[in-house]
């Protein structure tokens, strides 16, 4: 069903493409209505438009907070064309129909991203804009609503093809986009307010975002996927890609996992995290980026093939030269030296990402997982080994070196899929067992991966050992100390096994399941 566009209201914060769009509408004989800054921009371009205040007979008041909230605007958008009752009301009150609305909202998200003051952020909460957008979208049988300047060209092209009209299919598509925009806008505002509240899990949880990139496919080629940005860009979403082919769904997911783990190590030591299929396969700290990379790679060079390399130091030429000798999907670092970028550029498909700030594990936030019929929402696992009181439960206490490695291993095991086991030595992982249904299998797999390097290492478990078998197997593999949450009804058996094997064991009291 085609509907002619005879009258349009334009009220935009983002004036990209505005003048050309308005000129094209005017060229088709469309009467234009406008507000404030939009009206000034059109007047400066020599395009005639009726000011909203002239149409409503009521001036903008309260610093522009009230200008379009008027029956002559909303009735013009909401009236059902052809309804006798609506037609009578329009005639009685002198209300003209509005066939097209172009509105983009006050830039609330941008204001927050630029760390605006609270008062500035509040003033960037749009009220009249969303009200008009929702009215027009509700009445999409007759009204064309545009919330994105990228859609101006398509609308003008359709009007040209249909004698000044738009089709119902296009109006429905634009209405869906409009409701999506107001929902994401309100979600951003709700999340911003939520930062000041003691309860991060409100009665009504809002989530939304803007599509930043359509991805080639999802985890598998038969799945559709896209990247959405919500709130302040950070982590991989806020990273700048210097070179390489387009990031895939799995690249983005794995890079995010690598950065989460990297955030555990601060800036005191150089750190490197290598991730494959969302699990760390090598993590290390060192005196330099290249030392950390070498130690991380040594942990599991086979699994590192086709992985993600994350560094907390600027990428230098020496480190870049070593990384590119192994097939790598993504390198992500706080920056890259010019000669290092040139080395990476020789591998045209290798993505190089640079970030501003590294993610901090203590940053407040929530994680969201969809399930059939709803969402699971929880606060992020921001527990830090630095905040835990470690309790030695064996006769032997760990040495200073063992304790340092135990702390290191527990930082890493937090980022390994459960059931998780991590062996570590001298500030580097030497064996990782991830995602096993049985904890003793995770112990075995991690030891097998580490081989002889397990001897003299320490071992971390993300949750308690339900039986003594896991502790015994770690001891047989060559581990000398254990860190685990404790809390099993059979803790005494695990402690006894550790004592008999001469192991030191400490309890953290905190587990780190990761599903």
Image (spheres, helix red, strand yellow):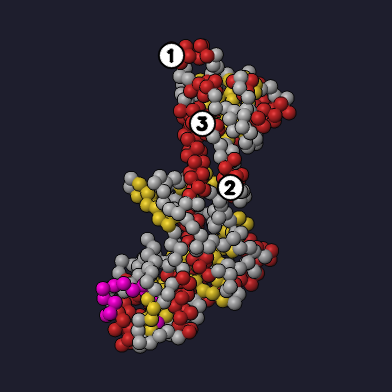
Q: Is residue 355 visible?
A: yes
Q: Which mark is residue 85?
A: 1
Residue density around tag 3, few if under 14, some if 14–19, many if 20 or more, within 10 Å: some
Taking the spot 45% from the left edge, 54% from the top edge, the residue there is: 198
> Do callouts 3 and 1 mark residues in contact (Cβ within 8 Å)?
no
- The answer to whether residue 150 is above or below residue 372 is above
Q: Nearer the viewer, residue 481 or 450?
A: 481
Residue 26 percent location from the top left of the image: 65, 22
Residue 56 percent location from the top left of the image: 59, 20
Choose the circle earlier in sequence order: 3 or 1.
1
Q: Which mark is residue 118?
A: 2
Identify the element where label 2 is drawn.
helix
Residue interval drawn in magenta: 479-493
> How far is mark 3 from mark 1, CA to CA?
23 Å
Residue 326 in which image quadrant: bottom right
Identify the element where label 1 is drawn.
helix
């Amino acid at each position: 069903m085609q509907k002619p566009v005879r009258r349009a209201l334009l009220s935009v914060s983002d004036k990209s493409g505005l003048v050309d769009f308005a000129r094209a509408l005017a060229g088709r004989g469309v009467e234009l209505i406008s507000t404030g800054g939009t009206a000034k921009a059109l007047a400066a371009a020599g395009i005639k438009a009726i000011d909203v205040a002239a149409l409503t007979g009521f001036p903008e008041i309260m610093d522009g907070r009230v200008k379009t909230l008027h029956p002559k605007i909303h009735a013009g958008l909401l009236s059902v064309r052809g309804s006798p009752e609506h037609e009578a009301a329009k005639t009685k009150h002198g209300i003209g129909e509005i066939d097209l609305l172009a509105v983009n909202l006050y830039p609330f998200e941008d204001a927050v991203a630029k760390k605006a003051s609270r008062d500035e952020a509040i003033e960037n909460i749009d009220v009249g804009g969303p009200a008009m957008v929702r009215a027009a979208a509700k009445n999409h049988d007759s009204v064309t609503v545009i919330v994105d300047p990228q859609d101006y060209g398509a609308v003008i092209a359709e009007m040209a093809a249909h004698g000044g009209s738009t089709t119902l299919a296009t109006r429905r598509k634009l209405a869906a986009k409009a409701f999506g925009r107001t929902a994401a806008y309100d979600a951003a505002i709700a999340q911003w307010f939520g930062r000041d509240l003691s309860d991060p899990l409100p009665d009504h949880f809002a989530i939304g975002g803007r599509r930043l990139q359509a991805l080639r496919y999802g985890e598998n080629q038969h799945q559709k996927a896209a990247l959405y940005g919500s709130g302040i860009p950070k982590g991989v979403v806020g990273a700048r890609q210097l070179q390489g082919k387009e990031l895939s769904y799995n690249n983005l997911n794995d890079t995010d996992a690598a950065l989460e783990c990297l955030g555990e190590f601060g800036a005191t030591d150089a750190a490197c995290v290598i991730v494959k299929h969302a699990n760390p396969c090598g993590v290390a700290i060192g005196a330099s980026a290249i030392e950390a990379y070498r130690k991380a790679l040594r942990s599991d060079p086979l699994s590192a093939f086709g992985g993600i390399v994350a560094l907390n130091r600027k990428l230098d030429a020496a480190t870049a030269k070593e990384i590119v000798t192994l097939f790598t999907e993504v390198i992500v670092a706080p920056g890259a030296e010019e000669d290092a970028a040139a080395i990476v550029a020789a591998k045209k498909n290798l993505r190089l990402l640079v970030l501003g700030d590294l993610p901090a594990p203590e940053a407040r936030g929530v994680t969201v997982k969809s399930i059939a019929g709803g969402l699971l929402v929880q606060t992020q696992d921001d527990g830090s080994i630095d905040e835990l009181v470690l309790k030695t439960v064996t006769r032997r206490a760990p040495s200073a070196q063992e304790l340092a490695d135990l702390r290191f291993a527990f930082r890493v095991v937090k980022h390994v899929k459960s059931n998780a086991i991590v062996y570590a030595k001298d500030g580097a992982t030497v064996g990782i067992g991830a995602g096993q249904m049985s904890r003793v299998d995770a112990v075995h797999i991690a030891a097998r991966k580490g081989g002889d390097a397990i001897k003299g290492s320490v071992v971390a478990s993300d949750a308690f050992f339900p039986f003594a078998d896991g502790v015994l197997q770690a001891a047989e593999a060559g581990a000398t100390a254990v860190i685990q949450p404790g809390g099993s009804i059979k803790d005494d058996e695990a402690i006894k096994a550790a004592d008999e094997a001469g192991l030191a064991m400490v309890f953290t009291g905190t587990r780190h399941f990761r599903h």
